[in-house]
Structures are given as C-alpha cells and as structure tokens.
C-alpha cells in the first residue's frame, strides 16, 4: 500500500511562532519578514533502498535533503547553519534532530492523507506549522 504522503504536495496553511523561532536562530529582520509571508510546499519522496528525499519549494528559496532513517547526514539549514542531522521514523511520523556548533533543533513532522504538521523546537520556542494537501 502506498504511503499516505506518496505523490502529494503539502502547502503551508497556518503557522504559529515562526517569527520567534527564526529570531532564536539569529535570522535578521528582513529575512524574517519575508519568511513570515512565504507559504512553502513540501514533498516527501521515498526512494529505493530506504532512502528519502524531502523537498521544500518556495518563491524565496528551495531546499532538498536526502536521508536514510537513523543515519546521520550533513545538512545546511535554510537559515545557513551547518548541522549534523538524523531522522528517525514511527509510522507516518518523522523525528529530526539537528546538531550545530551552538544550537540543537528538532523537527517533528506527521503526515496524514490531508495534512502535514511540523513542530519545530529551539530552546524554549515551539513553532507549529500546518500544511494542507494541494495535489
Ligand atoms: C518550512 C520551512 C521550514 C524552515 C525551517 C527552518 C528554517 C529556519 C529559519 C528560516 C529562515 C528564513 C525563512 C525564510 C523562508 C522560509 C521558507 C523557506 C522555504 C525553503 O518547512 O515551512
């Protein structure tokens, strides 16, 4: 049976505390203002051999990470941090830990047939972003 996210694109529908999250990461005001107005689209693609691709596209920037569940990989985050990342999976939930020189962040993404929720944490800041299926 195909995964719930298979062949779907999820577009940002609502966002809470993203400005606080970006501030804690040290993102400047101009980029924050832009980030607050952008609604990215996210696509998760499962490839052969247990590999995954997570594509984020927007009018500002695009990003793509490739990962294997449980295997550490190097990632450059959208705000420019170079981190060591690892993603684990529990069904349709993916838990990501990003370890950088100064900060540790986590992203919990849960996919359903109609939406994806991302809970992003840094320090005591919790940012919740909900994406709805567009196709
Ligand atoms: C999403 C975007 C997730 C972004 C997560 C962490 C990035 C940290 C700071 C953002 C820096 C700048 C914000 C500008 C644009 C945001 C959207 C870019 C999409 C590629 O998953 O919703």
Image (spheres, helix red, strand yellow):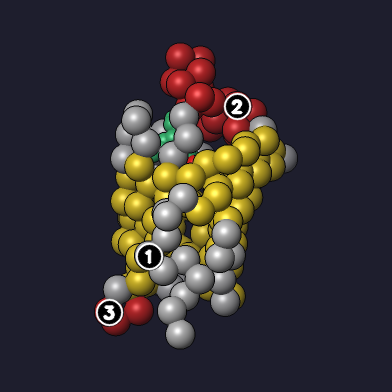
Judging from the image, what secondary structure is the residue with disc 3 in? helix
Q: 77 or 6, which lies in front?
A: 6
In this rendering, is residue 68 above or below 122?
A: below
The structure residue drawn at horizontal position 42% and vertical position 45%, both measured from the top left corner, is 41
Residue 19, which numbered label? 2
Quadrant, the C terminus: bottom left
Depth check: 64 or 79 in front?
Answer: 64
Which residue in the rendered view is the most extreme toward the bottom?
A: 1
For disc 3, the marked residue is 48
Number of the front mark, 1 or 2: 1
* Residue for point 67% across, 35% down: 16
Q: Nearer the viewer, residue 99 or 39?
A: 39
The reply, left or right, for residue 44 in relation to residue 133 is left
Residues at marks 1 and 3, CA–CA distance in whole angstroms: 15 Å
Instruction: State the residue position of label 1.
Output: 7
- The answer to whether residue 24 is visible is no
Disc 3 residue lies near ligand 1 with CB under 8 A: no
Residue 53, percent from left and from top = 33, 62
Q: Is residue 111 left or right of residue 47?
A: right
> Of marks 1 and 3, which one's residue comes earlier in the chain?
1
Q: Quadrant of residue 2?
A: bottom left
The residue carrying mark 1 has its beta carbon less than 8 Å from ligand 1: no
Position of residue 34 measured from the top left corner of the image (x, y, whole percent)? 46, 21
């Amino acid at each position: 049976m195909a995964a719930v996210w298979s062949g779907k694109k999820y577009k940002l529908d609502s966002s809470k505390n993203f400005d606080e999250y970006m501030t804690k990461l040290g993102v400047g005001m101009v980029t924050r203002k832009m980030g607050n107005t952008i609604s990215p689209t996210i696509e998760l693609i499962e490839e052969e051999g247990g590999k995954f691709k997570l594509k984020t596209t927007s009018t500002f920037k695009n990003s793509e990470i490739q990962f294997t569940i449980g295997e550490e990989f190097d990632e450059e985050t959208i705000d420019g941090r170079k981190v060591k990342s690892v993603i684990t999976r529990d069904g349709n939930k993916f838990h990501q830990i990003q370890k950088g020189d100064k900060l540790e962040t986590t992203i919990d993404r849960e996919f359903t047939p109609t939406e994806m929720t991302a809970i992003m944490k840094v320090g005591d800041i919790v940012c919740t972003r909900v994406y709805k299926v567009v196709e």
